[in-house]
Image (cartoon, rainbow, N blue to C red):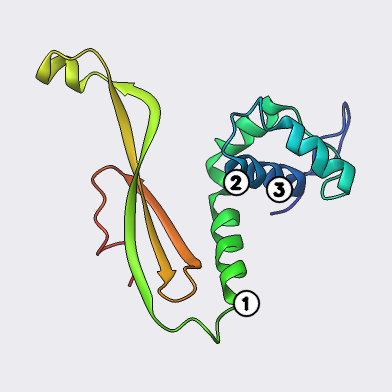
């Protein structure tokens, strides 16, 4: 992912730092506000140049244009074990979002229902390393995601 050219105003936080912060946020399993302490520690150690605020990380994680970069990083991290990984499994998991739909109000007279997404994952059977992932809506089928 290319860094945007700096023109004027406050210097932007690098894409590299924001990707690291996003991965750390997910790995920590804390809310955006609570993981900031871990992010400051990462800056003190030297993993990132500047610790972004929680809102910057949240906005960055919602951008769809970073998806190819994240997928490439997943594939790159798995390629190290290419000589070891030989047997793969495909599976999916449902992920609940915080957005609500009107479906339950119309159909079942229930007030709120969460939207769902599916993560279709290919992982090695022995090492359990994720080698590729595809995110779809709640009705996405496993068989059509990867050849």
* Mark sitting on residue 27: 2
Q: Between marks 1 and 3, how big is the CA–CA gap?
A: 19 Å
Q: Between marks 2 and 1, how big is the CA–CA gap?
A: 20 Å
Q: Quadrant of the N terminus?
A: bottom right
Tell me where residue 110 appears, x and y as whole percent. 18, 15
Question: In the rendered structure, which disc, 1 or 3, sits on the residue that comes first in sequence?
Answer: 3
Q: Quadrant of the C terminus?
A: bottom left
| Picture residue at 74% right of the left edge, 37% below the top | 38
* Mark sitting on residue 80: 1
Badge 1 local density, few (<14 within 10 Å), some, or many (20+)?
few
Tell me where residue 43 appears, x and y as whole percent. 85, 42
Is 119 on the left-hand or right-hand side of 37?
left
How many badges with numbers are in the image? 3
Secondary structure, mark 2, is: helix
Tell me where residue 66 appears, x and y as whole percent. 59, 47
Per the image, the residue denoted by label 3 is 20
């Amino acid at each position: 992912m290319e860094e945007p050219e700096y023109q004027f105003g406050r210097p932007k936080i690098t894409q590299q730092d924001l990707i690291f912060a996003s991965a750390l946020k997910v790995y920590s399993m804390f809310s955006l506000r609570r993981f900031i302490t871990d992010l400051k520690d990462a800056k003190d150690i030297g993993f990132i140049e500047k610790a972004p605020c929680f809102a910057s990380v949240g906005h960055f994680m919602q951008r769809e244009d970073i998806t190819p970069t994240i997928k490439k990083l997943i594939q790159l991290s798995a390629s190290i074990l290419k000589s070891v990984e030989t047997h793969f499994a495909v599976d999916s998991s449902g992920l609940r979002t915080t957005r609500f739909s009107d479906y339950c109000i119309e159909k079942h007279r229930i007030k709120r229902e969460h939207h769902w997404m599916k993560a279709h994952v290919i992982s090695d059977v022995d090492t359990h390393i994720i080698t590729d992932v595809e995110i779809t809506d709640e009705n996405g089928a496993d068989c059509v995601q990867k050849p």
